[in-house]
Image: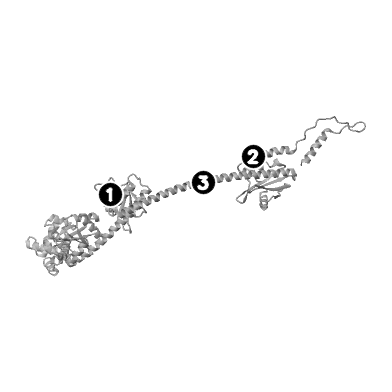
Amino acid sequence: MVSSRAHDLYRRRSDQTGSIPRDSAGRRPRAARKEPRPPAPTPADHVLPELVALSCALFDTPDEGEVLRLAMDHVAAAGPYSAEAGYLKVDDDLVPSPRNGEIHAPAVDCRVRELAGQDGPVTVPGWPWGRALGLRGLERFHGYLVVTSRSRPTEAEYSLLVTLVRHTAAALSVAFAHRRQREDALELHRLREERTVLQRQLISVAAELGYQRAVHALMDDVAASGGGEEAITRALHGLTGLPALVEDRFGRLRSWTGPSRPDPYPEPDPVRQDEMLHAVAREAGPVRVKDRLITLVRPHGEILGVLALVDARNEADEHTVLALEHAATSLALELAHLRNLAEVELRLHRELVDDLLAGIDEASAYARSEAIGHDLHRSHYVVVVQWSNRTADDSFAQTVDRAACAVGMRSLLTRRSDHVVLVADDRPHARALYEALARETGTRSGTIGVSARCDSLDDIPHRYQEAQRALEVRRHSRERYGTTFFDELGLYRILGPGSDYRELETFVHEWLGQLIDYDSRHHAAMVETLSRYFDCGGNYDETAESLTIHRSTLRYRLQRIRDISGHDLANVEDRLNLQVATRVCKIVLGGPG
């Protein structure tokens, strides 16, 4: 190529000068001596500056894709070349440059991949000469530059092309190194950030574990100290700064530590209390109910109580919840222990009371009572308790025991199929035990019978019958619920267990037989009317109201009673016998009325 350009230059100069004139001898005249002319510029004089500028641009470009683009755009600076395609090696794969031609791309791409990193010829239709030149750095292979030409390049032109390829490869190595440095710097920054986060998490976890250990150790110390519920609420208040409290499952306060304690403490609503317990039981962990954070104390599934924090400002965080849960665990152990002790004590009490009611040797009874801390040498009363909506199971027995303790009754306790029996060392108050049980059970539908005073252990079985008789009289009276004392029954003391049923039946038949037969045949209520009349003290208005009938209807019935029975209600003797007969029929024989 260089020789052809010189030849063309030479021809142009010859054409300009024309033929040289000769002398007469045919010789050329000697030319006048001239100054030497500077050499004509070669193609390299124009190419090299452009390549140097391109090389500088390549090395100043930090992006590998941009380096390849510059090389493809300026490949003509090295000679009569055209950049057909370029490839960069990314993760063991050759990625085509976006500037690659689309017409011959599949064929070129296939050929380049066949070369497997080696230089080699590439056939591109319309271009006589084509070659794929590898872009090789010192440490890695960067890709390919595919170059085509209209003619086969000279040695000098090919040398310039190789130089361009090497500079491009070197620039790619530099860009690759820069990219690796940036990636390494970013990775180092990421690792440092990750290390910082992990360190913070580790510090947080260590602090959390330290707090957990501190809470756990404190609650263990509280449990070991035997301080009970007061010690637990005191520790919980100290950990959280919030008022801490313990309620029984019925909503009655057992312990409070902290300010703002309500005085008096509100009486719970049994329905709402049950709804709250069921709602909290369905959730896992403490539950917020209004201004309280509540957790249930239930070591074996059965709810023994409620532990709560008063958090009116919603200040509780995860540490507060953690302290509350640990305190609930300690409280569960405490209440379960108390429950077990109560069950053992209740069983011992029950066995002793069962023997007392059946009859027992005094020496054995005294020894056993002393072992459980009860003095049987004092006078005692037998108390029978029955509640219409409660089965006389262990739970109800414990309820009665709590109520008795709450009113200051020192007693031994057992239970029967439908009632609970207490042997108390003092005469119960007329209403205290009943009111306490009404609060415990949430209903007033209960009856209590109390025997006369018992001064000897041998009298206890008989006193038990008296208490039952007092309870039955109360249950069949107008005011069914409340407390009845046997020694206040008067005439009704002879009615009840121990009486001769055959004689009582004869007595009832003698005075009420005709009325009972009449009621049976006509589906009437003459015996019940007469019984209500006596219960109301002979008051017409009160009797009519209790029977929900008109006063004139009552007068008619009383007249019919006189006619049917043949007895005169105005006669004192007849009136007394009729009243006793109605009581015997109702209380002892279970008849109408």
Left or right: residue 504 versus residue 235 is left
Q: Earlier in the sequence, mark 3 or mark 2?
A: 2
Secondary structure, mark 2, is: helix
- Above-or-below relation of 450 to 146: below
Is 83 in front, or is 357?
Answer: 357
Q: Earlier in the sequence, mark 3 or mark 1?
A: 3
Residue drawn at (70%, 44%) of the image:
161
Q: How packed is label 2: few (under 14 Cα within 10 Å), some, or many (20 or more)?
A: some
Q: Which of marks 2 and 1 is nearer the N terminus?
A: 2
Residue named by callout 3: 190
Tell me the quarter of the picture where residue 533 sits.
bottom left
Secondary structure, mark 3, is: helix
Q: Position of residue 573 (x, y in %)?
A: 7, 63
Residue named by callout 1: 256
Tag 3 and tag 1, C-beta contact below 8 Å: no
- Above-or-below relation of 499 to 403: below
Q: How packed is label 3: few (under 14 Cα within 10 Å), some, or many (20 or more)?
A: few
Tag 3 and tag 2, C-beta contact below 8 Å: no
Q: Quadrant of the N terminus?
A: top right
Q: Marks 2/1: CA distance?
A: 82 Å
Asked if residue 313 can be seen in this view, the reply is yes
Tell me the quarter of the picture where residue 422 sits.
bottom left
Left or right: residue 25 versus residue 340 is right
Left or right: residue 283 versus residue 468 is right
Q: How packed is label 1: few (under 14 Cα within 10 Å), some, or many (20 or more)?
A: many
Residue named by callout 2: 57
Residue 141 is marked as none
The amino acid on which the numbered mark 2 sits, given as a three-letter code, is Ala
The amino acid on which the numbered mark 1 sits, given as a three-letter code, is Trp
